[in-house]
Image (tube, grey):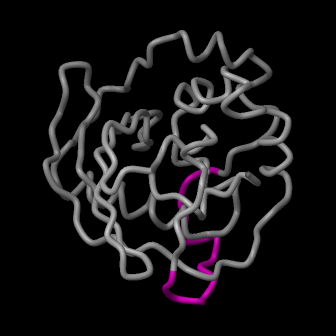
Amino acid sequence: MLVIALRSIVFAPLLALAVMAGIALAGSSAQPLAGECTLEPLTLPLFDATPAAEIAATPLAADPAPDTGDEVIREAVEGIVDCINTGDAAYEYAIFTQRYLAEQLADSSAMYQPEFEQQLSSGPSEVEETFELADVTDVTVLDDGLVSVIVELSAGGTTYRDTLVLANVDGVWLIDAIEAFDPPR
């Protein structure tokens, strides 16, 4: 998430170098179809050419969510995992809010935006391993309308348990923050 590779991380703050470092995966060798990911792919230019630092400094105003029930959030997380498993960076990074991506890209020492944009435009790559969603627990609606959730994924015999903050943006739940990683990355 140093060739930038989301495939090598679970939900770590993927654009920061430390977080984009690797997790060795082992699992299915079938390549999921991009059609399984229902999110719109991330496109260029990023942020409609607005400077990343400006977007990162703007607090996210989450859309009021009509339903934040456990099943709705689980379905949203399933969709996020489907996008991670596509092998296409344009879908893999579509799981994050623009604010979150901008926050990661605003610090060029953490991630260099032109390199990131090049990865987005490279198209899909072969998927050797995939993540499996094991569990979604502790769904909590926060005061600002965001939702905190613990997501458990498995890959290659390892289980990852991360605390995510989801935001409803235009009717779609996206990752706006990552609060905790287990195991740490």
Left or right of 96 in this view: 150: left
Q: Is residue 48 above or below residue 17?
A: above
Q: Quadrant of residue 109?
A: top right
Q: Is residue 176 above or below residue 10?
A: above
Q: Is residue 34 above or below residue 161?
A: below
Task: List x then y, in percent, for residue 42.
Answer: 69, 45
Q: What secondary structure do most residues of the magenta stretch adopt? A: loop
Q: Is residue 92 magenta?
A: no
What residue lies at 57% left-to-right and 17% top-to-bottom?
56
Q: Is residue 30 above or below residue 89?
A: below
Q: Is residue 33 magenta?
A: yes
What residue lies at 60% left-to-right and 37% top-to-bottom?
16
Q: 106 and 183: which one is in front?
A: 183
Left or right of 165 in this view: 43: right
Task: List x then y, in percent, for residue 13.
Answer: 50, 40
What residue lies at 45% left-to-right and 33% top-to-bottom?
169
Q: Which residues are magenta?
A: 26-40
Q: 67 and 147: which one is in front?
A: 147
Task: List x then y, in percent, for residue 3.
Answer: 76, 54
What residue lies at 16% left-to-right and 53% top-to-bottom?
70
Q: 104 and 167: which one is in front?
A: 104
Task: List x then y, in percent, for residue 12.
Answer: 47, 47
Q: How many marks?
A: 0
Q: Quadrant of residue 65?
A: top left
Q: Quadrant of residue 92?
A: bottom right
